[in-house]
Amino acid sequence: MFEAGEQFFIPSGDGDARFFSEPLGLRLVEAEWFPGRVARGEAILFLVEGGNYSGQYLALTSKAVMGLREQIVRYGYAGVVVHRITNPTASFDGSEKDAFPIGMAFVWRMEFANMFPDLRLRPSNSNGGNVVR
């Protein structure tokens, strides 16, 4: 399985070109305000680490029939719909006004980063970040 604090990455994606213009480093997080669902269904919450969107919350939902957690455990990656969280507060209701879908991508466990030799994650300003080399 996997748990809060584990690192993941999205090398690229389809959708909002500004958002997917550089690889995204992600950390799996838990938050009291996040119920584990968005309008599209079961979701997992991540925090972007590094780059232009550092500190932004994302909820990822599965593009497949198989659940997101099961895909990641089984394969180390999953096809996802990426939702930007616009209301990370106790009033979060999971609707598209609070979790807006911005595109599709594959999310990978950080241990698979060596499969992407040109991958460069920008460091975070807050904690020194994670740079894959």
Image (tube, helix red, strand yellow):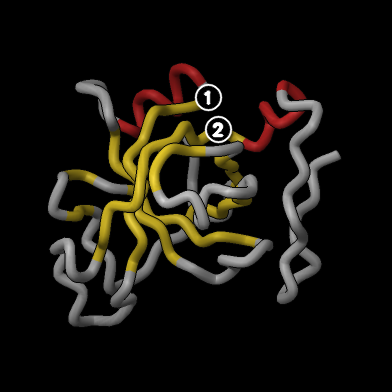
The Cα atoms of the two marked residues, 1 and 2, are separated by 6 Å
Q: Amino acid at mark 2?
A: Trp
Image coordinates for residue 121, horizontal then vertical, percent:
73, 49
Image coordinates for residue 98, horizontal then vertical, percent:
22, 69
Near-viewer residue (71 or 79): 79
92 versus 26 height, above or below:
below
Residue wearing tag 1: 76
Farthest-out residue, bottom? 90
Q: For the residues labelled 1 and 2, say whether their Cβ atoms are less than 8 Å apart.
A: yes
Residue wearing tag 2: 108
Near-viewer residue (96 or 74): 96
Image coordinates for residue 73, horizontal then vertical, percent:
45, 25
* Callout 2 secondary element: strand
Q: Callout 1 environment at 10 Å: few (<14), some (14 to 19), or many (20+)? A: some
Q: Identify the residue at image location x=16%, y=45%.
A: 41
Q: Callout 2 environment at 10 Å: few (<14), some (14 to 19), or many (20+)? A: many
Q: Amino acid at mark 1?
A: Gly
Farthest-out residue, front? 17
Q: How many marks?
A: 2
* Callout 1 secondary element: loop
Q: Identify the residue at image location x=47%, y=32%.
A: 106
Farthest-out residue, top? 75
User: In which quadrant of the rendered image does the C terminus lie?
Assistant: top right
